[in-house]
């Protein structure tokens, strides 16, 4: 691949362009908002000048509702040897293109499973896709050369290719992305009118649950409008679970021992199912969640503190498998949670104490 055209210079399109430019590909940036294309060009994502001839690959990075129309337009012009889109839904655009009678031999749908809460070209980074899954949904009509171009793009972005059926992909992202976004928003909405005293008690749990609620609502309306059926089915099942859980909680309030016992059993069951599901979330290196122990260290909010902890852990010969930071409300301090293999936790804890660190807890997961 020597040349590419990116249609749509938001977060994903600009990040793709930055990754390609960094690896020597000439990228042309196209956007109905000329100012946005110029911003992306100024960031080093390519040129906003039109290509002089056909490019190797056209990357359509517009909102899902506009993917099919944009693809049809550039494909009818013969703008590239191959065409892909990067929308977060795949079945809809494919079926729309079929309905328009477009020859799909030069097209393959794709979806990089990566993003940020922020949007627009200024949020883009060349490393956004590194190590992340990038789904490709070729059909029986997809030309091998075009699939190879798509795979080359994934490789240049240093992502991990995953081949799926388009409709299966849409059901999957409804489960692991679209439904969680809505649930996160529903939980975060409880905070809007909450008393300030309650909000000040927010800890890492509520931060984890509501983090993705900060993403752009307009963008998510486009995404959910393109995949409403699978998301609605999942939310219906979740609503049934909520109804049962509410009933169990009311039973816990009962003075009747049998009702209380049934309520406790209901809560235990939903928590058990949650634990069983969470274990299936891929952990480090894509494997199933691994059992680590957490060494929590109190740190001051000062330059160099994190670097010191990692250096001291390295001196102890301990590999940090994962790390999280929990900030203390109203204080210039926080807890750094260092996840390590269980056999390494006592050694890390003792070693850090010897070097003057304040160890708060060692937690098994």
Image (cartoon, helix red, strand yellow):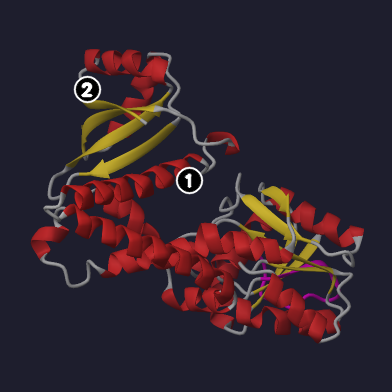
State the image quarter where residue 52 is shown.
bottom right
**Which mark is nearer the camera, 1 or 2?**
1
- Magenta span has 50? yes
Q: Is residue 65 above or below residue 171?
A: below
| Residue 78 position within the rendered picture, expressed as x and y whole percent measured from the top left | 87, 79
Residue 304 visible? The answer is: no
Number of other residues with Cα within 10 Å of mark 2, as a class: few under 14, some 14 to 19, many 20 or more? some
State the image quarter where residue 16 is shown.
bottom right
What residue lies at 19% left-to-right and 52% top-to-bottom? 252
Instruction: Give the magenta range.
Output: 44-60
The quadrant of the picture occupied by the C terminus is top left
In screen coordinates, is 299 left or right of 330?
right
- 92 or 322, which lies in front? 92
- Magenta span has 358? no
In screen coordinates, is 119 left or right of 138?
left
| Residue 292 position within the rendered picture, expressed as x and y whole percent measured from the top left | 41, 27
Tell me which secondary structure the magenta stretch mostly adopts: loop
The tag on residue 254 is none
| Residue 100 position within the rendered picture, expressed as x and y whole percent measured from the top left | 81, 87
What residue lies at 29% left-to-right and 65% top-to-bottom? 188
In screen coordinates, is 267 left or right of 19?
left
The tag on residue 277 is 1
Residue 32 visible? The answer is: yes
- 310 or 287, which lies in front? 287
What residue lies at 66% left-to-right and 54% top-to-bottom? 134
- The kind of secondary structure element at disc 1 is helix
* Disc 2 target residue: 357
């Amino acid at each position: 691949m020597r040349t590419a055209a990116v249609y749509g210079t938001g977060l994903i399109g600009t990040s793709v362009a930055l990754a390609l430019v960094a690896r020597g590909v000439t990228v042309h940036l196209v956007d109905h908002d000329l100012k946005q294309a110029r911003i992306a060009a100024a960031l080093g994502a390519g040129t906003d000048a039109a290509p002089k001839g056909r490019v190797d690959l056209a990357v359509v990075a517009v909102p899902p509702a506009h993917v099919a129309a944009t693809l049809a337009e550039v494909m009818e012009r013969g703008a590239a040897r191959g065409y892909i889109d990067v929308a977060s839904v795949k079945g809809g655009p494919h079926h729309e293109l079929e309905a328009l009678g477009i020859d799909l031999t030069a097209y393959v749908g794709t979806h990089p499973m990566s993003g940020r809460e922020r949007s627009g070209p200024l949020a883009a980074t060349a490393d956004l896709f590194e190590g992340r899954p990038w789904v490709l949904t070729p059909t029986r009509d997809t030309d091998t050369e075009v699939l190879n171009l798509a795979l080359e793009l994934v490789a240049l972005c240093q992502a991990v290719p995953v081949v799926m059926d388009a409709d299966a992909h849409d059901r999957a992202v409804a489960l692991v992305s679209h439904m969680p976004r809505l649930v996160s928003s529903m939980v975060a909405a409880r905070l809007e009118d909450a008393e300030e005293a309650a909000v000040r008690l927010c800890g890492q749990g509520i931060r984890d649950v509501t983090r993705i609620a900060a993403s752009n609502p307009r963008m998510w309306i486009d995404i959910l409008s393109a995949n409403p059926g699978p998301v609605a089915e999942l939310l219906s099942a979740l609503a049934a679970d909520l109804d049962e859980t509410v009933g169990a909680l009311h039973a816990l309030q009962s003075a009747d021992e049998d009702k209380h016992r049934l309520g406790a059993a209901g809560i235990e069951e939903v928590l058990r199912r949650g634990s069983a599901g969470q274990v299936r979330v891929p952990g480090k290196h894509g494997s199933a969640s691994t059992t680590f122990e957490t060494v929590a260290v109190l740190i001051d909010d000062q330059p160099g503190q994190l670097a010191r902890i990692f250096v001291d852990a390295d001196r102890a010969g301990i590999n940090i498998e994962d790390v999280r930071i929990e900030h203390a409300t109203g204080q210039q301090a926080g807890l750094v949670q260092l996840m390590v293999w269980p056999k390494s936790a006592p050694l890390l804890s003792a070693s850090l104490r010897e070097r003057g660190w304040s160890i708060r807890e060692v937690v098994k997961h």
